[in-house]
């Protein structure tokens, strides 16, 4: 499990990531424990014995990811939302 400081660090390191980017990051990190096991271990291990997802898994996944939306593109979407988006609070 991750502590509050680790979650804060991940949130800072994923600034500019879209919801889809964060989903991809979490999915990849969730596979981290399984990647550390041999095929035989995966086949015979009970699901409750799977090692937990750790901060290290998130760090490893982040090394291979970048935001999918450029900051310059994001500015266009934010402007559009300011002009035409939902004004409800």
Image: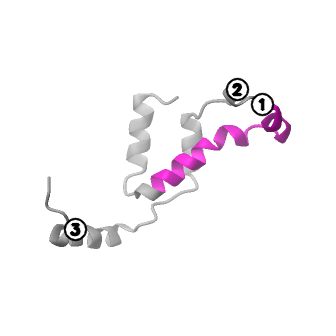
Looking at the rendered structure, the secondary structure element under dot 1 is loop
In this view of the protein, which residue sits in the foreground, 76 or 56? 76
Give the residue at x 59% y 49%: 28
Q: Secondary structure at mark 3?
A: helix
Q: Which of disc 3 and disc 1 is earlier in sequence?
A: 1
Mark 3 vs mark 2, CA separation in Å: 46 Å
Residue 73's image quarter?
A: bottom left
To which quarter of the image does residue 42 belong? top right
Locate residue 41, reporting x and y percent.
Answer: 81, 34
Q: Residue at x 39, y 68 (%)?
A: 70
Residue 82 on image: x %, y %: 17, 67
Decide: is 45 above or below 64.
Answer: above
Question: Which residue is under mark 3?
Answer: 81
Kindly indicate whether the residue at mark 1 contacts the one at mark 2 (C-beta within 8 angstroms). Answer: yes
- Residue under circle 2? 49
40 part of magenta stretch: yes
Q: Main secondary structure of the magenta part?
A: helix
Q: Which residue is mark 1?
A: 45
């Amino acid at each position: 499990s991750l502590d509050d400081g680790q979650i804060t660090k991940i949130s800072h390191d994923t600034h500019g990531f879209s919801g889809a980017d964060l989903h991809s990051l979490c999915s990849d990190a969730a596979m981290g424990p399984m990647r550390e096991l041999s095929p035989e271990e995966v086949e015979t291990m009970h699901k409750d014995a799977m090692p937990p997802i750790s901060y290290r898994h998130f760090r490893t996944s982040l090394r291979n990811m970048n935001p999918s939306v450029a900051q310059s593109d994001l500015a266009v979407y934010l402007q559009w939302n300011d002009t035409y988006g939902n004004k409800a609070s």
